[in-house]
Image (cartoon, helix red, strand yellow):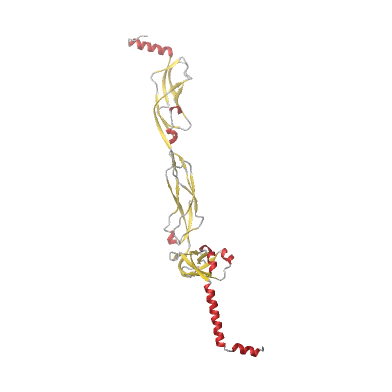
């Protein structure tokens, strides 16, 4: 077949042949379309602001972006919303004002490795309008609440937070309204040892961001609670007096105030206390002023005593017996 004959065959009845070709293309196109499926994901919107500007309005309208994916039906189950990141980038802007920014969508490494074909991705809306202003910086203290009641006999001291302050970045007029940042609470219910907890700064304003790590270490000291106890009319013992002597007169008593932690005070017994005067130095009868010695178990301390020293009369035991005989004779008694 020569070229002339081929061209004659090709152009013979060409309108019909052209129509058939177009119809075959249309059929092929719709067949391919029938093999595709569309799925829409709701993806959180991220605002990238690496420059000196920050949005002051518009974020509350669009917190999520609808990402529509179109690909082969059998490939749809391989995709999830975690495979997409939707963002607008305002980093390049250097002037305050109202600007429109395109919405960009990036895909995960997993989707890149899957190499899906065909793959169509569209974002709705595809652009957003923000009012932007210059960034400002402010340092504010962090605060935490402590709740619960420690174990019996213990008390909680003030919570210690580390770091005690955080830096906030945002529009100046919004930062002016923030005086502190809450980092959560610490439960000390029934605790008898210090309580530590890692908390996180709570920021509910989309236009404000925390510059540093928002994690805060909270430490609540739990210490023994002090308690005092009154000890009235405690008898003073006279120790180490030579055998030939005696102390004349009625028993001497002292009142004491002691202190300890609640649990130890509740367990206090008189065996934990010694109150005495050391008379070992006495060698003859007479009137003496001697210091009162107070000894407590290590769990207790002395707060106050009604006496620091006492005056005593020391006599020989024979003299004491004679005095008793004379008293009995005067009263008509017998020996």
Q: Look at 56% across and 65% down and name the residue there.
A: 111
Q: Nearer the viewer, residue 262 or 211?
A: 262
User: Residue at (41%, 22%) from the top-left corner?
Assistant: 311
Q: Can residue 92 be seen by looking at this rendering? A: no
Q: Position of residue 317 (x, y in %)?
A: 43, 13
Q: Nearer the viewer, residue 300 or 112?
A: 112
Report the residue that reaches farthest toward the right: 2
Position of 246 relative to 71 (above/below): above
* Res 235 → quadrant: top left
Asked whether residue 321 appears in the rendered view, the answer is yes
Residue 147 pos. (x, y %)? 42, 47
Within the image, what quadrant is residue 188 found in? top left
77 and 324: which is toward the camera: 77
Quadrant for the C terminus in the image? top left
Rendered position, 23 above or below 220 = below
Residue 183 in the image, given as x and y percentages of width and height: 46, 52
In the drawing, does residue 24 fall left or right of residue 318? right
């Amino acid at each position: 077949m020569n070229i002339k004959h081929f061209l004659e065959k090709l152009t013979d009845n060409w309108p019909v042949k052209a129509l058939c070709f177009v119809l075959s293309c249309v059929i092929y196109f719709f067949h391919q379309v029938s093999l595709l499926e569309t799925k829409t994901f709701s993806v959180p919107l991220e605002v990238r602001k690496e420059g000196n500007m920050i949005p002051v309005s518009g974020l509350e309208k669009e917190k999520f972006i609808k990402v529509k994916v179109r690909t082969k039906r059998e490939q749809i189950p391989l995709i999830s919303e975690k495979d997409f990141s939707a963002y607008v980038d305002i980093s390049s802007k250097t002037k305050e004002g109202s600007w429109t920014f395109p919405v960009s969508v990036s895909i995960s490494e997993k989707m890149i490795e899957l190499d899906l074909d065909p793959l169509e991705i569209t974002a709705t809306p595809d652009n957003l309008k923000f009012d932007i202003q210059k960034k400002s910086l402010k340092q504010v203290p962090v605060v935490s609440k402590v709740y619960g009641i420690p174990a019996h006999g213990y008390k909680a001291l003030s919570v210690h937070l580390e770091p005690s302050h955080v830096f906030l970045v945002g529009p100046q007029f919004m930062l002016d309204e923030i005086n502190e940042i809450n980092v959560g609470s610490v439960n000390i219910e029934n605790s008898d040892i210090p309580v530590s907890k890692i908390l996180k700064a709570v920021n509910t304003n989309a236009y404000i961001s925390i510059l540093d790590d928002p994690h805060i270490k909270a430490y609540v000291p739990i210490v023994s609670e002090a308690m005092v106890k009154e000890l009235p009319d405690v008898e003073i013992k006279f120790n180490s007096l030579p055998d030939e002597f005696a102390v004349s007169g009625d028993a001497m008593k002292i009142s004491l105030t002691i202190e300890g932690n609640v649990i130890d005070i509740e367990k206090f017994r008189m065996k934990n206390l010694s109150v005495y005067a050391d008379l070992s130095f006495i060698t003859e009868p007479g009137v003496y002023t001697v210091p009162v010695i107070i000894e407590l178990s290590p769990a207790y301390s002395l707060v106050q005593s009604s006496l620091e020293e006492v005056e005593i009369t020391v006599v020989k035991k024979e003299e004491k017996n004679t005095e008793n005989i004379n008293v009995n004779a005067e009263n008509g008694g017998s020996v």
